[in-house]
Amino acid sequence: MPKTLVVYYSLSGKDTESVSKELAAALGADLERLETATPYPADYDAAVEQGKREAESGFCPELKPLSHNPADYDVIVIGTPTWWYTMAPAVLSFMRKTDFAGKTVAPFQTHAGQPGHVISDMRKEAKGAMLFSGLRLEFGKSGLVSPKSELDEWIKHLKELG
Ligand SMILES: Cc1cc2nc3c(=O)[nH]c(=O)nc-3n(C[C@H](O)[C@H](O)[C@H](O)COP(=O)(O)O)c2cc1C
């Protein structure tokens, strides 16, 4: 079995986090939540505005130190909420400072109906990696909107990596 790390960012600690925890449990993987050194405003609308400026300018916020070293893993699953049609800035920071050469990268995104170009942006940042198909999951106020079978299928295929 390849050694797998699930790395994710989740502003709310809900949508992307719930998927990441399910993936880590199903794959027997380690789990790493990315956190920015400076937290976003607690007010959601203010966070959305700051996120707009950051996502549109390609800003890479400083991250808190990670508890796992990506270099130790064969497969890195990376999860991000959609922020202004791209990945969250914290995920861009992580991808820019990680060497993916020789690893398999499996990207997934959560979104609220406007998925944008997150997966293709993540693919561009995963330099040197073998790329696993991307997964898009829509969430609404009461949870997962996309069919749960899409996540289950993705997990099934990830388990076949050997
Ligand atoms: C700064 C910001 C920008 C967002 N931009 C988008 C977007 O472009 N498209 C979309 O569908 N959802 C967008 N959303 C909604 C989140 O992607 C969605 O609610 C996601 O499931 C949240 O994941 P989380 O609970 O792990 O933080 C945005 C949310 C924030 C905070």
Image (cartoon, grey):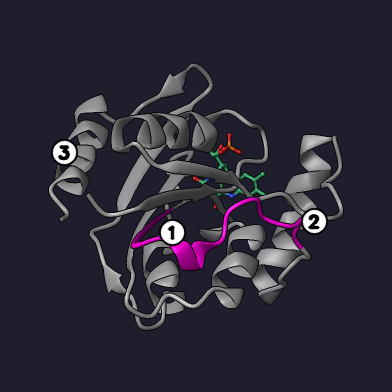
Q: Which residue is mark 1?
A: 116
Q: Are marks 1 and 3 in contact (CB under 8 Å)?
A: no
Which contiguous range is marked in magenta? 63-77
Q: Residues within 10 Å of mark 1 (few under 14, many from 20)?
A: some
Q: How far apart are labels 1 and 3 at the CA level?
A: 25 Å
Is the C-beta of the residue carrying label 2 under 8 Å from the nearest atom of ligand 1?
yes
Q: How far apart are labels 3 and 2 at the CA level?
A: 37 Å
* Element at label 1: loop
Residue 74 higher or lower than 139, as above or below:
below
For the stretch drawn in magenta, the main secondary structure is loop
Quadrant of the image where one finds ligand 1: top right
Please tell me whether mark 3 or mark 2 is closer to you in this view.
3
Q: Position of residue 125 (x, y in %)?
A: 46, 76
Please tell me whether mark 1 or mark 3 is closer to you in this view.
3
Q: Which residue is mark 2?
A: 50
Q: Residues within 10 Å of mark 2 (few under 14, many from 20)?
A: few
First in sequence: mark 3 or mark 2? Answer: 2
Residue 82 higher or lower than 52, as above or below:
above
Q: Position of residue 27 (x, y in %)?
A: 30, 38
Q: Position of residue 66 (x, y in %)?
A: 67, 55
User: In the image, is residue 71 part of the stretch drawn in magenta?
Assistant: yes
Q: Are marks 3 and 2 in contact (CB under 8 Å)?
A: no
First in sequence: mark 1 or mark 2? Answer: 2
User: In the image, is residue 41 part of the stretch drawn in magenta?
Assistant: no
In the displayed structure image, the side of residue 154 where residue 52 appears, left or right: right
What amino acid is found at the position of numbered circle 3 in the picture? Answer: Lys
